Every structure is written in structure tokens, then in C-alpha cells.
Amino acid sequence: MRTHRFITGLTVSLVAVVWLSATDTAEARGAKPQKQWVTGIAIPRGSPPMYLTTDHLYFTDADDGDSTIFYRITSVSNMNGVTLLINGVPAVRNSRFPQSALVAGNVVAVQHNGAPDTSGTFWFAVVDDEGNQCPTANTRWPEDFTISVTEPVTLLPTLTWVEPDGNEDTIAPGEPFTLKWTDADADDNALIDIYFADGLTSTYIGSTFEDPDGEADEMVWDTTGVPDGSYFLCARVTDKGGTRFFDFWCEHPVTIGSASGGSDWRPPQPVSLTNDTSYTAKALEMDGLGNAMFVHRTGLYEWKYNFFDGTAWGTDAIAPGMLAHSIANPALRSDGAGDYLMVYKRTSDPYSVHAIFYRHEDGWDAVTSNVSPVNPIRTTYWYGNHDAAFSADGHAMVIWAVYKPNNPMRIWTNRFDGAVWQGETSLGTGEGVAIAADGYGNFMAVFAESDGQANEGNIYYALYTNGVGWGPKTLLHNRTTDGQTWSLTYTHTNQRKTIDVAGAGDKKFVAAYILQSAGSDTRGNQVGRRVYGRAFNGTAWQVERRLDNGSDRPIWRGDPDATENGIGLAISPDGTGLTTFAQLNADATPLHEVWANRYDGADWATLAPTRISFPLDATYGRARLLYPPGRRVAMDAAGNGVATFYQVVGATREVVAVHFHPDTGWVDRTVLSATNNDESEYRHWMAGDASGKAIVVWRQDTSANWWSRAYVK
């Protein structure tokens, strides 16, 4: 056993690369205890064959990082076939065999099985499973010969964390913590660098070499000067003198001082959901009084709800008045004074949109209200997405899109005046609807055009002024702007949200939307690459701004089958706003980074968002916004905010919260599900209120158990 002590160093950024420069050797890095990782070039998979004797063919195999690769030795002449003897076992011509047969010491014998080749030469090629071919070589025969392989380093180094292990991993500020792991490497010369990550940056702790026996390796982490918070550890193993590296994240954090990094997240507690193991048809909302409600549809098509009283969750109960049919896409909204509005779509005949209230003094309404009675109720009509808003003055608005074959989708609204639903009003053609309320009974609707004509792909808005009514349908985004159009939703079934709007104060609204380049729309195979936003200051919309990072890499739009969002959006009564979105990382792999942009009351940070997911690596860094079709970010009256997303940590997916403060920016990253990370926990719902409280509910992927954590300032 070896023990190492290192002092915390300066912060470095971990760049998501697969290869390091060949000049970045262990010796060079030994003289520089910290450095910025740089992108290098890929090393060829195989080197040219060389002759040892007339009856031996020699080739070396470079480290490709794939421990399951298969090789085959193929006759590339049209002459006689060959017989492969793999460790003495015959194989047919063009046989495929595992790399384990090629490790040092094993011999693959190749024998001729036909008449002598009159040319005296037989050609072979060495080809791997991916079609990469070493340069061909010839050998003379009829002599039997063997192919010998030396130093095939295709086996990955391994490292398993032992400490932290999820038990007693909280220490006082400045207290040392002993990190432990076991490791193995075929070369016995791998360099191990240890880092800790606070969510936005990774900081170097120290380095050591792989232990030949691979057991009981330790490093003492001196935490002097490290701020309070929860930190994840990463071991970066560099193999073959700096030519390849592999990151091994520990799935358990070390917590220094405050268990939440300055954020008062209460300990996890279970949420009881009976007859329900799915993660669809659910919604979460807070009521402004410190309470929360979680509604969910069971496998028996019953609607149930759980109530959080500010301290604990109650047992779920059937919500009376809701239709027990095939119902989807619940939208749960609160007036901020204790009452809730639930809006959902019935997806079986008769198709319709329904609304029902929960009053904090009286409970649920006796019956649900069909807010879409005027629309023809026939199976030839389909409903697109819908949304709802509930104002602090007790007024509410429901918006939805309806489709008839061979006709454009049309948008309808229905307003609740505090006593009754007033009836439907059409806003014209459109789809992809979103609506928000301010604090005074005004509503802002934002949607895309669907007329199939020249305006298709434009985004429009309509403002409902309390006491006056709906204003005209007015252009918000012109599809000719930077060649960006909106056409990301398949109108019949797609419920993902790529347009959103949020409201607060007196006619203060922010809107954000995902766009794609004009001309690339193929209906069902679109790629959004940019995020734009605008703010309404009470009288007019301000200048449109581009909010993404400028890379033009695809934006995560959500999964339509799971009714996910592509955008998180919130506004504070002080007029500031926050939006979050996920964009592919620099490697253009299926890995995402979560970004945030802020409207400071005057303007957005154009092309200057902040990445709030912690640094990515090529294997475990995936981060995405996920669930629900409601909230992804929330703000209080002072302009503070909290955003949630999932981040792959170690081998599991975890729910992560990051807080925003106007003076300090994005800080206090907390892994909410870390105490239960024996399995992936990432499907989650979040809600917050103007007082600064927030709550998150998530599901464990394997056991289907449900958990929650509440944030109280």
C-alpha cells in the first residue's frame, strides 16, 4: 500500500478529448504538476508488418481502447485457401478470432492446404472488425509459418473507487480526506491524476503511478481552502506514455462543511405512488404557501395526487372529478396563493381538453370542465399540444391546437374569469403553443404559424389584456432572420416543447424558442441548432437575441414520446429572466452540455451563455435537460434562480441542481439524488415559487421508487 499527500492546486478545465498529444508524456507532465489538457491526434490502429524470418510475419497493434476487438487474418490472393490454427485449434479461411488470442505469448499458426503456389508468394492481410487493415505483406511458402504478435496493448486500464463510498463522507472544512481505489493496467506504467469537480470547474489534487498489485492505493486530499460544498472525484488514467487517457468518476461525493454547498436542500424523502411505475403523465407545482402537489396517472387510468405540506409528502389519493380514461400531458399551474389548476388532454374518443381546480380550502372540484366544447368531437380530429396559465388574481387561461386532416392547425383559448369558463376564442392558425400569466390577469400566448403558406415557420404572439381582451396575432420571429425557421414539432402527436414563455409582475414576459436553418425541415427529422429569446417590457417586445453558444451544434429538443421539454424558462417579478437548454458538446457526439442564459432586465447575454453542467469527458459526461413538460428553472422575487438537469456521474445518472444569484452567478451545485445512487436516478420534475422555495421529485430507474427533496431558504 502506498500513501501520497498532495496540496490542492490551481483550477484547470477538463477538455472532452479522446486522444492527448503524443508529446504529452508522463515525464514531461512530471515536471509540470498542472497543465491544460490539449487535443492531440489519433494514433493509427496498427503499424506496418515487418519480417522476422522467412516463416514469420510480425506486426504490432497500437492501443485502440477497445477490449472487445476481433481480428481476422485474410487471404487476399485468389490462389489457394489457408487453414488457421488458433492455439492449435483449426479454423476456416477468413476466420475471425478475439484479440485475447493475440496477447503476448500466444501463437497463431497458419498452414497451407493446397498445391504449391507457382508464384512462390502468398498474400495475407490483417483486418480488424471495423475494417481497418494493416498494410499487406507477403510470405514465401510451401514452408509452414506462424504469425507472432508482440505487445498488443488493446486492454483498457481499470480503476475502481473504494473511498468515498457514500458512508461518512462529510468532513469539516480543511480536514484531510483519504481517497482510496484499486487499479490495474496491462503495462504497469499508467499515470493517475486525481481531480475534484464542483460542477463548473475541475481542480487538480495530485498524481501517482499505477500500482503493480493494483490494491489499496491511497491519496490524502488536503482540503484546506476548498469552499464548503459537495465534490465529485475523477481519476484520469493516462496510458502508454501520454498517448491515451481514461476518466473514472467516483459516484459518491465528498461533502465539505455544509451538506448542500450553502444551499438548504433538505434530506431526501420517499414519495408514495401506488399502482404507478411509469414516468409519463405527471406534473409538479408549488402553490406559493410552501406546499406542493404532484399529480400522476396510474396504470389503471386513475388520476392520483400527492400533497406536500411544507414538511412531508402525504399518501397519494384519487383526484375526484377527473376522467378515468386515456389522458395525457397534464399541465399543473398555481395562482401563487394556494390554489391549483390542472389541464389535460383526453386522447380517446371523444377527444377534448379538460380543466379542473383544486382550492386549498375546499379541495378538488366535483367535476372536470370540458374547455373545448365547440370543436368538432370526432375521431378525424386531433389535438396538438396545450398549455395553461393561472394568474394571481384568480383568472386562468387554457390554450390548445386542434388539427383536421388536410387543414392547417388552429389555436383556441378559453378564459376562466374567476367564476366560470367564458367559452372558446380562436387566435387563428398555429401550433406549438405556450402561454403565461403575469400577476394582474394579463396573458401572453406564443406559437408558430401552421398555415402551410409563406408564413409557415414564423413565430407569433398575442396579448390578452385584462378587461380588454385579446390583441391581434403579431409577428414575433421572422423566419428570414439569420435563415432560421421554426418547424420542430410534428403536429399530430409530438408534445415536446420548443417554444416557451414566462410571465410575472405587470405585463413582464420572456420568450425563448429553438430554431433550425431554413430549408432543412423534413417533418420528423429536424435538427434545431439555435436558441433565440425576446423580452416584453410591458408595452413592447425588445430586440431578439441569439442565446446559444454560437456553435450551431444540435440543441436537445426533448423526446416526443415522453413529453419532454427542450427549453427551461423562468421570470422573476423583478423583470429578470433565466433560460436553460442542452447543446451537443465540441466532439459532436451524443453527449450534451447544459447551458444557461440570463435576461438582466435590459438585455440577454448574446452568444455568451454559461455552462452549468460540470466538465464532460468522452464516456460519462452526458448531461441533458429532462422532464417535465413544465419547469426546468425557477426564480424568486429577488432574481435568484435554480435549474435542474441530469448528469452522468460514475456509472449512474443523477439529478443535479445549480443555483443562480444575481451577484455571484451560477453557484452551489448540489447532486440531489446522491444518497440513493445505487441505480440511475434522472427522470425528475421541479417546481419553485416567488419566495425562493423549490422542490424536486425523481424516480429510480430500476426499482421505480420515487424520492423528493425540498429547498428552503
Image (cartoon, grey):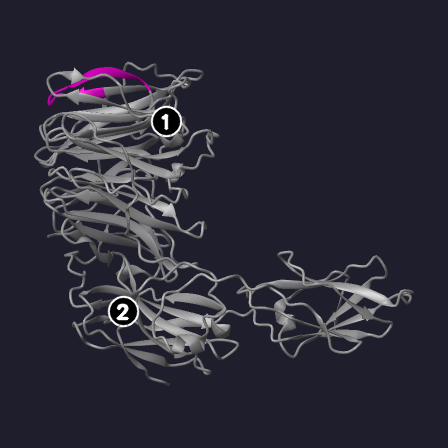
Q: Give the quarter of the image for residue 247.
A: bottom left
Q: Name the amino acid type tagged 1.
A: Arg
Q: Position of residue 216 (x, y in %)?
A: 37, 81
Residue 476 as seen in the image, left or right of residue 688: right
Q: Is residue 186 above or below residue 255?
A: below
- Magenta region, main secondary structure: strand
215 relative position to 425: left or right: right
Distance, label 1 to label 2, CA atoms, is 46 Å
Q: Which residue is mark 1?
A: 479
Disc 1, SS = loop
Location of residue 161 (image quadrant) = bottom left
Circle 2 — which element? loop
Location of residue 157 with respect to 575 vertically, above or below: below
Apparent side of residue 369 relative to residue 192 in the rendered image (left or right):
left
Tally the marks.
Answer: 2
Residue 322 seen from this side: no
Magenta range is 414-429
